[in-house]
Image: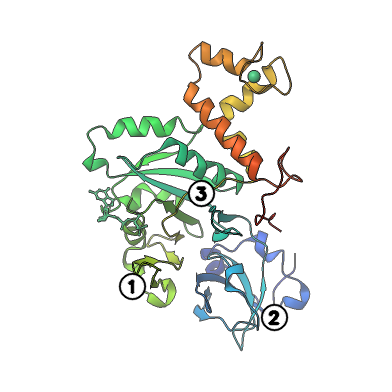
Amino acid sequence: MVTVTPPLPTDRLAALGWDDFFSSQILPAQAHLLPARIANVHRARLGAIGVDGPIDLVLPHHTNTGDYAVGDWVLVEPQTDLLVHRLQRRTVLERRVLSARTPQLAGANIDTLFIVTSCNADFNPARLERYLALTNQAGIDPVILLTKADTADNPEDFRQQALQLQRDLPVVLINPRAPEAAALLAPWCGAGRTVAVIGSSGVGKSTLVNTLAGSAIDQPQVTGGIRESDAKGRHTTTARSLHPIASGGWVIDTPGMRTLQVSDVAEGLDTLFAEITELTPLCKFRDCTHEHEPGCAVQAAIAAGRLDPERLARWRKLHQENRDSTPPAKGTRGATPPGRRRKS
Ligand SMILES: Nc1nc2c(ncn2[C@@H]2O[C@H](COP(=O)(O)OP(=O)(O)OP(=O)(O)O)[C@@H](O)[C@H]2O)c(=O)[nH]1
Ligand SMILES: [Zn+2]
């Protein structure tokens, strides 16, 4: 590890999420540069937060701002605010949609992902499992937030269903409009921690970000969210931003997501479906598909009522989709469809 000179105010950097993982990446020749965290990404502009506050970064020629994610750590030339280098990410959340060639970066260096859904028709186990597979694969801790419990007859049913989605999954019933929402989420929002919020349009993500930010939201230079018109003339939130949480920590909002595609998430699926993953070695055949083989431990669990057949059906569908969309070098079979590339 290299000591940065002059010594940086490490407590203020730590409050931004800085730790040894990032400081150990600084080379001796970079010791004069200042670390800063990307706070917002626009088409031609990147905003960051450093120990002395917001920085409008000066970008080198040919910078593609799409290569940067909210939450990234970068090194900056102190006098000129020139962006010099991006540090390696601890975690990165990518959103893949069928229509896009390359995944979009939804956020970087996220510790916890709040997957928000409502206690109504938005609640969809198959979609939540998709989010969970991606979150697990990214090495980010998932938490399910169930909103609009106040408008549902049986919010507890939704909570019980959500608890079945993954072992040890935290599930929180929450009203994002209530001031006590911040206290309920405090375990994941300590100083220096970074959370991101994901979920369909209208489930309460923006409301939650506002509640978490509290008075800290009155800093447009830090949050800097913009609204742009899309092709249909609607106003949609396109910029992701890093907002300070009133009690410490940081929250990244993400725009409403369309259908998510899973790709390259084999380990994430193993964690998500741990009860099936653990049964597989007990099957008679090593390459058991758990469909029709004799001596299948998974089918035996279904017959004994210990495993929900719908859960196995969703396991099958996600595994199939993952195989079909994962490049052969990483997947077990299946070719790369045109236009879809491996991530570098
Ligand atoms: N009754 C009730 N209303 C809620 C709750 N959570 C959110 N809402 C309301 O639902 C509406 C949508 O909330 P938003 O925060 O705009 O939803 P969003 O997820 O940010 O939506 P997009 O910006 O489209 O992605 C707002 O009118 C909120 O006040 C809740 O728990 N109970
Ligand atoms: Zn089997």
Q: Name the residue located 28 percent from the left edge and 48 percent from the top edge.
A: 175
Q: Which comes before the other along the chain, label 3 or label 2?
A: 2
Q: Name the residue located 28 percent from the left edge and 35 percent from the top edge.
A: 155
Residue 298, visible in the rendered structure = yes
Task: Answer above or below: position of 69 versus 144.
Answer: below
Classify the position of the N terminus by image quarter. bottom right
How many residues crowd mark 2 within 10 Å: few (<14), some (14–19), many (20+)? some
Q: Which comes before the other along the chain, label 1 or label 3?
A: 1
- Residue 170: x and y in percent read 44, 39
How many residues crowd mark 3 within 10 Å: few (<14), some (14–19), many (20+)? some
Q: Amino acid at mark 2?
A: His
Q: Name the residue located 41 percent from the left edge and 56 percent from the top edge.
A: 256
Q: Amino acid at mark 1?
A: Asp
Look at mark 1 in the image and give the residue it sits on: 218
- Residue 5: x and y in percent read 69, 78
Q: Amino acid at mark 3?
A: Leu
Look at mark 3 in the image and give the residue it sits on: 260
Disc 3 to disc 2, C-alpha distance: 41 Å
Look at mark 2 in the image and give the residue it sits on: 32
Q: Which mark is residue 256?
A: none
- Residue 238: x and y in percent read 43, 67
